Image: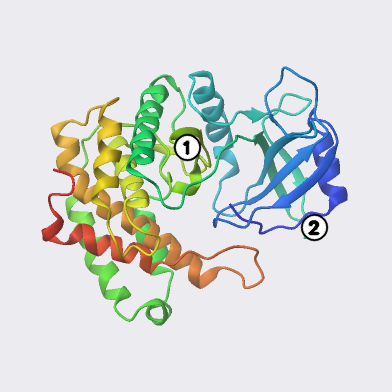
Amino acid sequence: MAVYTHLGAEALGELICAFNVGDLVSAKGIAEGVSNSNWLIETTGYGGGKTGHYSENGGARFILTMFEGRTEIADLPFFLGLLDHLADKGCPVPRTIHDRDGASFRSLTGPDGEEKVVALIEFLPGVSVSLPTPAQAHAVGIALAQMHKAVEGYDQNRRNTLALPEWRDLLEACKPEELATIDPALGETVTRELAFLDANWPRHLPTGVVHADLFPDNVLMLGETVTGLIDFYFSCTDIIAYDVAVTHAAWCFDNAGRNFNPAISAALLKGYESVRPLSVEEREALPVLARGAAMRFLSTRAYDWINTPQDALVVRKDPLAFARRLAFYADPAHADVFA
């Protein structure tokens, strides 16, 4: 989440009026993340019995998202329909708030005259943990597996637009001297690892709709209970075990990627397999899939590190945090991580 486009109070008020959620009380930009512009919205409320998290003063809270360059507008029916499908299946995900005409998203003209698209979704209670416990990791593994089973009836598909070919494209768009400003060895690392992944990427594992971005800041928790899986705007149809690998890479290291936590790893995998056991083929592929997961976030973070506007209200993510994860997964000494 982030704020790339700035909207004034009048524009936000007019926009919120298009939804039957009461009048705008406050809007706070959310700085975390790197993809879309987001605001925490509070309104006067729209009566009882409808979805929404209510504040102490009786107002309702929502998340307003404005989709920026990396999100294709044609994909929004897939993303927003997925939220409603999973919510109907009992998964802890936010529902989409439809406007007065029944649409799940709206267009508006941004302050720069560019056409923008926005969606309003339910606000869910909970906090994102920065130092997860094994019990919390176990709960996240369960929630991920439950999501993978719940999407079996979802009838829409979306190609992963941040798969291996796109990792290569993003890194090739960065000049060697630009990558060297991040780390002198980075160019050599990505060249070697992309060649390895090209040669070894699994092609015949079970596929389905995956989250593809389940970092701790995309999971809301109260204690050891998962109250929300959020930010599905990278979700797609891909190898299901790849989603396990992405979540493993996101949860099992410190933020800098320097320290691996084996207790978190074991708890996450145990929780997942208590709901959806991995096949022998899936488990054997996890080391390669984890290297791919690390490369995916290394590539996008390196590109964003070089290309993010200096005046954007956004916290840039360190690419080396995933270069270190990549080195960990590629090290034969760690071959037993997924055993």
Residue depicted at x 52% and y 42%: 233
Q: Is residue 86 left or right of residue 148?
A: right
Query: Which residue has dot 2 on it?
Result: 111
Residue 48 position, x and y percent, is: 76, 19
- Where is residue 311, by image quadrant? bottom right
Is residue 57 shown left or right of residue 251?
right
Q: Dot 1 corresponds to which residue?
A: 223
Determine which quarter of the picture holds residue 24: top right
Please tell me which residue lies in front, 77 or 289: 289
Answer left or right for 216 relative to 44: left
Residue at 57% in and 39% down: 74
What secondary structure is found at the residue carrying circle 1?
Answer: loop
At label 2, counting other C-alpha atoms closer than 10 Å, the crowd grade (few under 14, some 14-19, many 20 or more) is few
- Observer-nearest of 262 and 12: 262
Residue type at the position of mark 1:
Gly
Q: State the residue at coordinates (43%, 35%).
A: 224
Q: Amino acid at mark 2?
A: Pro
Decide: is 282 above or below 312. Answer: above
Quadrant of the snapshot with the C terminus:
top left
Residue located farthest toward the front when viewing the structure as drawn = 223
Residue 285 coordinates in the image, percent (x, y): 18, 43
| Mark closest to the chain's N terminus, 2 or 1 | 2
Q: How is the image coloured?
A: rainbow
**How many numbered tags mark residues here?**
2
How far is disc 2 from disc 1 in space, using C-alphas?
A: 41 Å
Structural crowding at the residue carrying mark 1, measured as other residues with C-alpha within 10 Å and reported as few (<14), some (14–19) or many (≥20): few
Residue 180 coordinates in the image, percent (x, y): 37, 80
Residue 117 located left or right of residue 11: left
Secondary structure beneath dot 2 equals loop
